[in-house]
Image: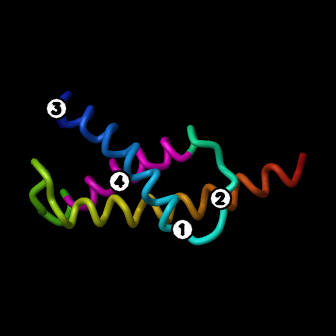
């Protein structure tokens, strides 16, 4: 990945994190900074999956975006459950 690609992934990751949180039903009691991190991780993992499947990852790619959003949604569910359990212990 180039520097431009990394910056684009970060910006897109911010958007993906927010979108993933909107797609998960119910209320997620996680802070916004954690949503941003989840979006970034989802964006990088989604891009990795797209590359592993030999999909074009330069420019905008529909399937890459779908993988990124799906991974971010899964991560939002996992992180929100873990975050809720963490708060229940204190």
Q: Which residues are magenta?
A: 35-50
Quarter of the figure with the C terminus? top right
Q: CA distance from mark 1 to mark 3?
A: 32 Å
Q: Are marks 2 and 1 in contact (CB under 8 Å)?
A: yes
Q: Is residue 36 magenta?
A: yes
Q: Is residue 89 magenta?
A: no
Give the secondary structure at mark 2: loop
Give the secondary structure at mark 3: loop
Q: Position of residue 3 (x, y in %)?
A: 20, 28
Q: Of marks 4 and 1, which one's residue comes earlier in the chain?
A: 1
Of circles 2 and 4, the one toward us is: 2
Residue that badge 4 annotates: 45
Q: CA distance from mark 2 to mark 4?
A: 22 Å
Residue that badge 1 annotates: 24
Of circles 4 and 1, the one toward us is: 1
Residue that badge 2 annotates: 28
Q: Quadrant of residue 55?
A: bottom left
Residue at 64 percent of width and 43 percent of height: 31
Residue that badge 3 annotates: 2
Q: CA distance from mark 3 to mark 4?
A: 16 Å
Quarter of the figure with the N terminus? top left
């Amino acid at each position: 990945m180039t520097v431009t690609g990394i910056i684009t992934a970060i910006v897109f990751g911010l958007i993906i994190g927010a979108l993933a949180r909107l797609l998960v039903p119910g209320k997620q009691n996680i802070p916004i900074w954690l949503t941003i991190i989840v979006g970034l991780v989802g964006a990088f993992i989604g891009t990795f999956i797209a590359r592993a499947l030999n999909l074009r990852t330069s420019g905008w790619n529909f399937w890459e975006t779908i993988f990124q959003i799906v991974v971010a949604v899964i991560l939002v569910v996992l992180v929100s459950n873990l975050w809720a359990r963490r708060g229940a212990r204190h």
